[in-house]
Amino acid sequence: MSGMDRRAFLGSATAAFLAAPLAAGAQPAGPAGKIWRIGVIGFASTTADMAGPDPPYPFIKALLDGLRERGYVYGRHFVTEPRGAEGRAERLPLLVDELVRLPVDVIVPAAAALPALKRATSTIPVVVPGAAGPVGAGYAESLARPGGNFTGLTLPFLELVVRRLDLLKELVPFAATIAVLWDQAAPQVWDVLEAAARERRWKLLSLPIRDVGQAQEAVRAAAKARAGGLLVTAGAFDPQPRRIVEPVAKYELPAMYHQRSYVQLGGLMSYGPDLVAIWRASAAFVDRILKGAKPGDLPFEQPTKIDLVINLKTAQALELTIPGSLLRRADQVIER
């Protein structure tokens, strides 16, 4: 996509992402008496936490809130068919097959379920609440015109990874080495970071892990190497953030994360999109599909806001002074 085409795409995507819900009194389209079945797949959650009109799982609750804003009433216009993998990736193909066999009218899945969905169906619409590189992964022909049965929101995953590295180095400018905890299933992350560090003449320590059970040993290795900071990238270990945050605190490492949830558990800093807001925005795609739009005709969109979150209590425990330049840019500062 050329620079001009990309700017045009992002401009239209931003307008759509911020589109207002249905006007008061407007009714969802559909055959009289039709109750839509919306499949939802969570990776870290249980099925019970995703079920019903007021589920405790925040992402599904956000999706349902977005549908309510557009005039949909649970039980009258739609119901959900929830499936939770409980953090077990091997369960995802089975859960996907269950929804495809029902079948459902549209599926809104956690990103981890996308490969199984791509294999299982080319006809049921899939609304993706935050996919990294949907074109490169084969889910879309292009962002502006996906062409298949996938659409939704896309995240500038690799660009954000480099931005997090820059912010962490701004926090610990005198750190001789920055350690990077990354998922071995996503080697492109390390490739991009290594190239960025080489360009900036920074030294990185590679800490690849396969699962969260290896996190403590990896963090210990970072501390032993006297790393001045730790960058934690997205990975299969995300459903268990506490098992990352606790060893990081034990070894007193200043760390940058990709999700706010890590900082809420005591992590130092995060930079990333509001995932709850993204799931809520996914309701706009579901609405348009239920009204007859083809997913292949709906451009992928990007979230317009990326949040910097800082935990001052953790900074104080580390005896670390947060630069004013970072505090002024923070979208949320946790003080207790």
Image: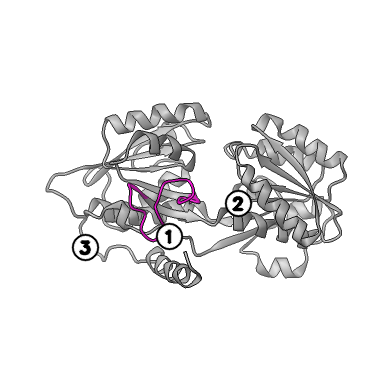
The residue where tag 1 is placed is 301
Inter-mark Cα distance, 1 to 2: 21 Å
Q: Earlier in the sequence, mark 1 or mark 3?
A: 3
The residue where tag 3 is placed is 25
Q: Give, as a three-letter code, the residue at label 2.
A: Arg
Q: Residues within 10 Å of mark 1 (few under 14, many from 20)?
A: many
Q: Residues within 10 Å of mark 3 (few under 14, many from 20)?
A: few
User: Nearest the camera: 156 or 263?
Assistant: 156
Residue range corresponding to the magenta coloring: 131-150
Q: How many marks?
A: 3
In screen coordinates, is 193 left or right of 177?
left
Q: Give, as a three-letter code, the residue at label 3.
A: Gly
As drawn, the label of residue 260 is 2
Inter-mark Cα distance, 1 to 3: 27 Å
Secondary structure beneath disc 2? helix
Quarter occupied by residue 167: bottom right
Q: Is residue 132 magenta?
A: yes
Mark closer to the observer (1, 2): 1
